[in-house]
Image (cartoon, rainbow, N blue to C red):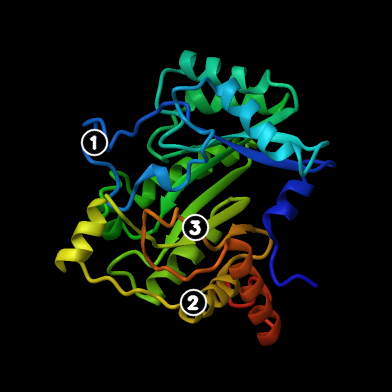
Amino acid sequence: MACYSDFATFLSRHFSEKVQKISINAGFTCPNRDGTKGVGGCTYCNNQTFSPGYCRPQKSVAEQLEEGKRFFAHKYPHMRYIAYFQAYTNTYATLRQLETLYAEALAVDGVVGLIIGTRPDCVDDELLDYLKNLAEQRFVMVEYGAETSHNSTLAAVNRGHTWEQTVDAVRRTAERGIPCGLHLILGLPGESRSDILTTVERASALPVDTLKMHQLQIVRGTKMARQVETGEIDYHEMTVDEYIDLCCEVVEHCREGVCIERFVSQSPAELLLSPRWGLKNYEFTNLLNRELSRRGIRQGSKYGT
């Protein structure tokens, strides 16, 4: 028996066939980059860390999807695909512009749905009503970058939104029957283990379908990397064992029924400064699953405590 519900479990609730996400960079920016709410973006962010080689805004949405399909086709020739609008804030445009981009993605052969990554302060009711209507025909999911439930941390990393805005966005999305996920970063500067588990509990209490987490990574070229180098912020580099121990507690405090998409992310070696564990994502997950089984941990066993 699995120790927690994973992303494959979530997908199986919506698809009878195997599906694969293909990341897209549609050329968006963010309100904390363009001066609307701030400049410079989040202090930890370098979007090169999670964009595949085919994922470049100089190419159209359709071109990126076709290249992504070719990338996966040799392993999974009968796979279906979800267009994942991932880079930056993928609702930060006029509704007409968004409709055009989303329609272009859904028109690509083999694409069966959308996952839209965005910020909780960049979804108005008009957009959500449009997505509700679209979701009646195709699979649509919204993934909000929450990162933490602590407003002091959000301010320190220049997110430009509050936890209260996350709560509001999730509730308005769920009210329309649209699947919803939250993205969290574990280990942001200044946060204790208790702070992290509080965020997991608060996120679990919301009507979310998935939680997507990863360790804080210090990435070359970011403001946070400079802050760590100069000692401006207090940064603790977790070992693999420390992070596995934390993730075990996260599973215990995550509400049963919420699907945990991931626990780690891996930035390119040439950009990653810390932590450099030398593990592929699946290798870490295997280590974590073994430890969860060894301890007899089950998801949600400490939720609400």
Please state if 89 lies on the left or on the right of 44 as rendered.
right
Q: What secondary structure is found at the residue carrying circle 2?
A: helix
Q: Which residue is mark 3?
A: 266
As rendered, which of 228 and 197 lies closer to the eye? Answer: 228
Amino acid type for the residue under numbered disc 3:
Gln
**x, y percentage for residue 100?**
54, 14
Q: Is residue 232 visible?
A: no
Q: Is residue 120 above or below residue 239?
A: above
Distance between mark 2 and mark 3 Cα atoms: 13 Å
Distance between mark 1 and mark 3 Cα atoms: 29 Å
Mark 2 burial class by Cα count in 10 Å: few <14, some 14-19, many 20+? some
**x, y percentage for residue 257?**
69, 60
Mark 1 burial class by Cα count in 10 Å: few <14, some 14-19, many 20+? some
Q: Which residue is mark 1?
A: 37
Mark in front: 1 vs 3: 3
Q: Earlier in the sequence, mark 2 or mark 3?
A: 2
As rendered, which of 91 and 242 lies closer to the eye? Answer: 242
Q: Which residue is mark 2?
A: 240
Residue drawn at the location 69% of the way across and 67% of the way down: 4
Please state if 247 lies on the left or on the right of 229 as rendered.
right
**x, y percentage for residue 160?**
28, 44
